Image (spheres, coloured by chain):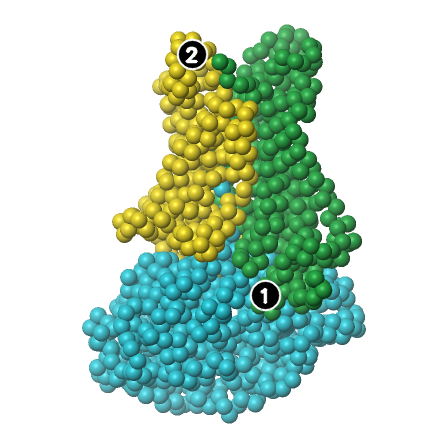
Amino acid sequence: MQWTIKRIGAIALTGAVTVALGACGSSSKSDDNGGGSATSGGKSGGTATVLMGTAPDYLDPQRAYTTQGAEAHWISYLGLYTYAHKNGVEGGKVIPALAEDFPKVTNGGKTYTMTLRKGLKYSDGTAVKASDFPFTIERAIKAPWGGKSFFTGYIKGAQAFDSGKAKSISGIKADDATGEITIDLVKPYGAFLNVIAFPSAGFVPTGTKMGNLSNNPPPGVGPYILKDVVPNRSFKVVRNPDWTDQTVPGVPKGKMDISVKIASNTQTEAEQVLNNAADVFDWGDQLPPSLASQVTAKAGDRFAKQNTVSTYYFFLNTQTKPFNNLKARQAVNYAVDRRAIARLNGGNFKPTCWFLPEGLIGHPMGECPYGDPNAAPDMAKARQLLKESGLAGSTVTVWGQNRSPRKEFTNYYTDVLNQMGFKAKTKIIADAQYFPTIGNLKLQPQTGFADWNQDFPNPSDFYLLMDKNTTQATNNQNFSQVNDPHIQSELAELNAVPADKLDTVADRWQKLDEYLAQKAYIVSYGQQQNPKFFSDKLNFDAAVFHPLYGNDWSTLEPK
Amino acid sequence: MGRFVVKRLLSVVLVLFAISIMTFLIFQAIPSGDPALRMAGRLATPQQVQDVRQQWGFDKPIYVQYAKTMQKIATGSVESYTQQLNVLDEIKRGLPATISLSVGAGVIWLSLGVLFGLLSAMSAGKFLDRALTVLSLVGVSTPVFFLGALMLYYLAYKLALFPLGGYVKFTDSPWGWFTHLLMPWFALSVLFIGVYSRVLRSTVLDTMNEDFVRAARAKGISERRVMLRHVLRNSMIPVISLFGLDFAAVVGGGAILTESVFGLHGVGQYAAESIGRLDVPPVLVITMLGASAVVVLSAVLDVVFAILDPRIRL
Amino acid sequence: MATTDTGTEVPSAISAARPDDDAPPGIGPYALAWRRLKRNRAALFFGGVFALIVVLCLLAPFYAKHVAHTGPNANHLTDQVRVGGKLKDVVTPGGIPIGPTWHGRFLLGADGNGRDVAVRLLYGGRNSLEIGVVATLITMLLATMIGLAAGFFRGLTDAILSRVLDLIWSFPVVILGVALGVALAVGGLNLGLFELKGNSLGVPAVIIGVVYIPYVAKPIRGQVLGLREREFVDAARVQGLGNVRIMIGEVLPNLASTIIVFIPLIIANAILLEAGLSYLGAGVQDPNPSWGTMISDGIRLIPSAIHLTFVPGFMLLFTVLGINVFGDGVRDALDPRAKVRIER
């Protein structure tokens, strides 16, 4: 008997955006909810139902690498540092969590020293020790955590531990008696504080098993406890009864218990929140365009679009024809209509031409070199430039993944290339296969879909993609294979600037980004906007929308 | 007789073995990319990818991988690539939904199919027959994914007559279990009702001309009794064998579409999600289970019919 | 016999047509069947519907150039079109495409990318029909050969062939189709002898064609098993004809009515399966249109752009229904016992 299978991409994952760790949103200007910071006022009690269109890849804190997991982990597995529970740029600031205070940075930025806060306990009552920190990092490396290169690339001795040459990480020293922790780096890295603020660096007791504990997560420190996991179906994040607002200043105790259910498609997910049958529409999902008008009409007071710090772009391979030619690359930037792609995304893009998005330090303030992204493109100029380059008529294969709406972006882009004068064809491949495929240097993909969401609020995170040092033979992320001496020399200095001094180099980052746009190494077109969408049972304005973690569940409260 | 059974069993074993090899080859060997790359994550270095490869044994020759995988399946310790969940546990978790769907739909399609087929045959050539034939042809020509999506939107969302998909365990709430399954039962049955009514119609019409039916009528038995006791009973044989095979296939993951559209999280949906993630172990196991169910059941039916009718033992 | 996803069942054995009461004596069985078919108005009507759809699809390039003034892949995301005197967005800023305008441009509306639905429908129909027909050809050819060989030679040949048929037939077919489709989408198929590019229509056609072989081969085998015992086969052997000549010369013509009945059934099944596979992403690859991919793309935009699901969905329905009713009529014509009224 033959039955037709429903395509995954069509419904089950329609619009569900699984982003690499840390997709976040600085709230847009019109939606800044200043009053959403952690206070002890307001009501509390009850359970809020959160619907997610995509299940977290893992619920084991040292393995999770998508936003869905992070939403639960950042309030149930605190590490030495965490982020402020505030909206917008304020939420991007690092605050001490299990560490008593900010670290002392010495030795030219290569040594970090901090002291563990006293008297902290895990959710199972075990006392927190300083040596739990190196254990946690080792566990993350062994897991392996998808972002472990942040640890192995910077912490001294971590690489040796990873390859099995050492039994522990020599660069981390922890004294349980005094609570002092010292971390030595191989080279200065301004964003290192952000690195140890990752949820994967959230403490677990020494001796926790190394295997995948997603079904039965280990104890952690925080205002919430993760439990009752049914894989791919549901889990609960309940308030820790022993947590108070004073346990860690800046990390409030929660107001409601959270029950998370994995929805099978975003259509029913949105309908349930609209009908108040569920409370929160996960920020990582997209509202189906067909429901958008109903939502704004019926639920305008509990729905808002939030800018995320992300960039959606098409990469242009600078090492092969035709995009090794500057004029050809610039021509494409003139031809692409950013408004059109925004429409394909249900209107949930903020059109842009820059690589660094708005809300991130370094986002250029000047005019786009290729015309206003909110206005019609200049196809005539594009065609002319292409003719001048002598590459009109070149065959181009455009790569894309078969997840909607990315597939649609790619189809549109191919059409644009054809109208310009290329002979372009789309090659759509399976979602799960996409990034490994185009990350294989042997393939030399000419152009195709790519996106990046911030791991943390620091432009050096984005510029990983433009750094020739990160190019590798497989799993390459520098799809354009950018190898630009000016960029390299700038990055060498800018990457060392510590996170809290970022403001001082803001205009240097801006100039670098403007330089990138003029070299047209990519075709940037949009910044994702994500929904903050609740049922009418929750207090919409009181809930914080965090730039990194979306809906701050610890600030949800009933009306 | 004994030789026939032995021969049949032997062929079952051979076919199962062949299925396991074929499935494994298709999913593992055809160029669908390097699973180690996918599993290692987006920022993995080549060394990290190689570590994953060694950990999972992807660097070993294919027959070694095959043997290891079969061993893991036999001992029930197969793990999926993307989430390292035990596949058999996941399948067990999805079985209640799949079985509830299949059994309910099976009852509906068998009874309605037989009813419509019988009515059609009894009024052969007349308007009722034509109308039922057209209806069954429509049911059989409708793409099921189309039907499911429309039902969900119009009946569940707009008119709020039914819940918006999902599965409720019988032990949690019998009424909830029932209401959540009504639309999926109907969507899945529509296709089969069309088929079975036509099959029954044709077998009934064949049977009605048999001598024993004429004899029964000649004996003066009422038409109703003739239809029900003599004609229907004999016409049901091919239908029952067909039903057995179709039912086995549905339970073995064949109701993928219905499960996915309605979000029932059964075995079929698990297979669909795994294919989308290019996650081989679950698809491998489900395919083998489904195929095995059909092969074994068909062999059993063959033996049963051979017992009943010696002519079949070719 | 088992059910296929279109539900059209596979008949066990077709006996030769019995003469009608009012037919002139001496008329051959095929001429007789043709007469009966001509009198079956429903079958003729639906057959005509199918033929009309085929013709329309073949005229796709003409329609695109002269009526719609656009191609199947041209995006018109930021264009506007005049409807009823007013200028409307082809696709709104919120991503909702325009519905049917009932004029030359965007007759049946636009899709999410601003492409003309009617144009894509016709081009997609070409793809869907082409795959359906090619797949059916593959099936009928291979199934006849296998069924003939298995039924005629029996013994070991039959045993092996029957097990191969069992193998194909017991697979949860759609899973197989999808997995193969997904796997082959990137790299295509290279078997040394012949190569299919990943993007080509050949991949789904081959998959579908192979998948249906057992459904046809088994009944043919059953029929051949019976036929080989008949006198005309003995007579041919006595004449000294070799096996192959007997198979092709004597047995095969008797299979003709079975084969004829199967063809529309398999075409209908193949088209539906292709829609299902394409819907799943495992059949026709982007951006080639096919009714299946159009339906799956359209489901995302229910309900604000219902036409995207309805138009290809109903087109698919009517096409398959057309073939099914016509095929039904052909079968009735060849085997009229089904129309016998109850004798009193």
**Left or right of A415, for residue C142:** left
**Left or right of B262, for residue C197:** right
Shade representing chain B = yellow
Circle 1 residue? C95
**Between marks 1 and 2 in the image, the one whose residue lies nearer the viewer:** 2
Q: Position of residue B108 (x, y in %)?
A: 40, 37
The chain painted cyan is: A
Q: Position of residue C301 (x, y in %)?
A: 55, 59
Q: Position of residue A446 (x, y in %)?
A: 65, 65
Q: CA distance from mark 1 to mark 2?
A: 68 Å
Q: Residue at x 56, y 67 (%)?
A: A346
In the depicted view, which residue is nearer to us: A14 or B213?
B213
Could one spot residue B67 in this view of the protein?
no
As helix, strand or loop, the secondary structure at mark 2 comes to helix
As helix, strand or loop, the secondary structure at mark 1 comes to loop
Name which quarter of the figure residue A153 lies in: bottom left
Circle 2 residue? B217
